[in-house]
Amino acid sequence: MRWFIRLILSFGSLLCPIQKLKLKQNAMRNFLLTCLLFVASFAFAQAPTITGDILLCPYTNGTATITGSTTYTTYQWYYKYWFLDDEYEAIEGATSSSFTYDWYTYDQALLKVVVTQGAQTYESNSIQIDSYAWVGLTVMHSTNDNVSEDGNGGYLLCEGGAITNTIGSPYTSVQWFKDGVAIAGATSNVYVITTPGTYHAVAAPGFCPASTSNTLPITVALNPDCLPADNTPVIEGDTMLCEYTDGTAAIANGVIYDTYQWYVKFYGDEEYTLQEGETAASFTYDAYNYTLSSIKVVVTLDGETYESNVLFIDQYVWGSLSVMHEANDAVTFDPDQGYLLCEGGEIINTIDSPYTIVQWFKDGVAIEGATSPVFVITEPGIYHATAAPGFCPNSVSTTLPITVINNTNCSPQTGAPVIAGDVMLCPYTNGTAEITNGQTYETYQWYYKYWFTDDEFVAIEGATSATFTYDWFTYDQALLKVVVTQDGETYESNTIQIDSHNWASLTFGSEFSEGVVPDNETFSYLICPGDFITNTLNSPYDSSIQWYRDGEAIEGANEGTYVITEPGSYYVVAAPAVCPNATSSTLVSPLVVSWNPECTAGVNDPSAQDAFVIYPNPASSTLNLQLPQSSLLNEYTIFDVTGKNLMSGSVNTSASAINISGLAAGTYIIKLNGGQAQATKMFIKN
């Protein structure tokens, strides 16, 4: 402390020699304190440190702030996206000590602030903004023997019937509803239905409790014929199988019959096939041969023949086990040796979904407590993991080994080039690798090899500059490096591994309203006016969406859900958000919809459907209806895609306007009724 006071005295004597000579002791003390504060303001001025909300829920905002109590003269916030090589851009109007940002614009952005104090400019650290993402809301249903399906997606209930409904992860904030009214205490992800009604649930992940979604409705009615025919066999069994496993179906109604014969109808067949030798009260089948088949049993008792209900057999499917690796700057990768570890080195290993049952191993020994999909390696060894999906815990796979050794030369090689580049490519795109250490060399030669072979690196013909551009197909799973020369010396760079995004084929699930009938001869669906088919894209297709009808793009049909209300041949084009230009199409297997010629009188007349016009579509605040003068349609109801009744009213003239400003943006169905006629159309609210 004495040296610091002497420094202040010296500094004060330099700044104020005349005052020092004239002031008395008390004045001198005050003067020295003033000088101390003056010098301290320069001695302790420093760059700002920022913190903030770095993981956001959909449709929310976050705030970044400067920590500490230092006040600066000016502030300017900047951003850039971490996966681009662009420079930081100043954010217009963001000129205070804090900055509030939305989840959509700044997802995957780096934020920083530049401040001034006096004549000095300081730059903060950067923080990366991300947002949560999860799969769509789904419900698994299981029923007991007193429940049957009505053929239209609903259930028929007899006494003692129970339908167990389970909402999948990660939805933990749940409220179940019956006939549009919240059920008191029904806040678990499992709910058992035992009485008739129309049920649905509203749910959200625990980490984003405000990001709610609605399930499709579950329609339950009383079965008008709860007493099955005497002695009719009832079978139950394993309908969802894991790979390489067997399932068993058995007669469950307790009757012992004289003879048994099991039958199977395989996918695509029209007739059931007798299963030779399967003449017992139970039947065991394997996942490989019987997936996507229907099974039943025909029995005899006292000279009478009876036929059972039908079970449909399916199998769980999922992607192969893979691990993503991310290493910090203290780790390098050698294709011949593995990962080379310096002090402070970390390799973050993440097992992809749906593998949730995990055990990590080091040198062949299970690591105690290492049962998470994410494991961080910080010391040498040979690591691997065994993993299985939660729904098939015995279907265990093993990862490739991860070899980690100590780096014997943790100091960087003098003059050696450092390369970086695009390591994750979308289909049909190119990436570029380049030297990043700022040095210019005399010669360059790029090399590659595939990481999973023992081959030597091969020189790439013509790749003799400081950068190298490569395509996703040829160099997928390749290691790249560059060898350079300078002043007669040869240097070799680090390696980077190239990979490409991949995902499942484009598919969508369909939910059918009551009245939709499949036509097995034409592989199409028959509808009456008022019927609808709700189609929802499966993950990960959530970008570049366009639905088509009869080869023409449907205006405004750019969401993951589309509701069909009229005949046509429908297909969709879409891509994952991670590769929005890599579109796929269902054109080769369109969903064909036709009018049902057997609809009841009045309702089956498509003239009401064709004459009923809505505009504009999409609409913002007002939806206009246009009907012929002779139309019998005089009432309307608006539903969401889950079937929930949102609005209703009367149609008094041939041209009516409905105020829809209170609806949230999304897809809706408007249904008109009157007399024996009804008509349905879909519209989009902006």
Image: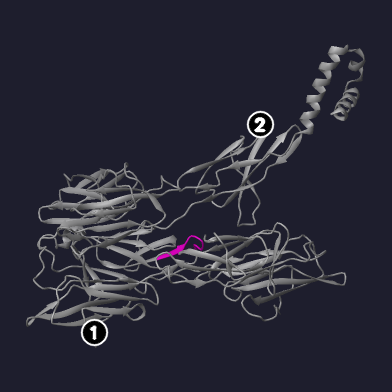
Q: Which amino acid does label 2 sit on?
A: Ser
Q: Is residue 585 visible?
A: yes
Residue 592, by quadrant, is: bottom left
Residue 665 position, x and y percent, is: 36, 48
Query: From the viewer's perspective, is residue 462 above or below residue 584?
Result: below
In terms of depth relative to the viewer, which is nearer, 369 or 409?
A: 369
Q: Mark 2 points at which residue?
A: 69
- Residue depicted at x 11% and y 68%: 228
How far apart marks 2 and 1 lie (CA) works out to 81 Å
Provide the residue span drawn in magenta: 573-580
Q: In this view, does 647 lie to the left or right of 425?
A: left
Labels in figure, total:
2
Residue 270 visible: no
Pointer 2: residues within 10 angstroms few (<14), some, or many (20+)?
few
- Name the image quarter holding the N terminus: top right
Element at label 1: loop
The picture places residue 290, in percent across and down from the top left corner, at: 31, 79
Residue 278, disc: 1
| Tag in front: 2 or 1 | 1
Residue type at mark 1?
Answer: Glu
Q: Is residue 574 magenta?
A: yes
- Quick one: 280 or 189, which is closer to the camera? 280
Q: Is residue 623 above or below residue 340?
A: above
Within the image, what quadrant is residue 649 found in?
top left
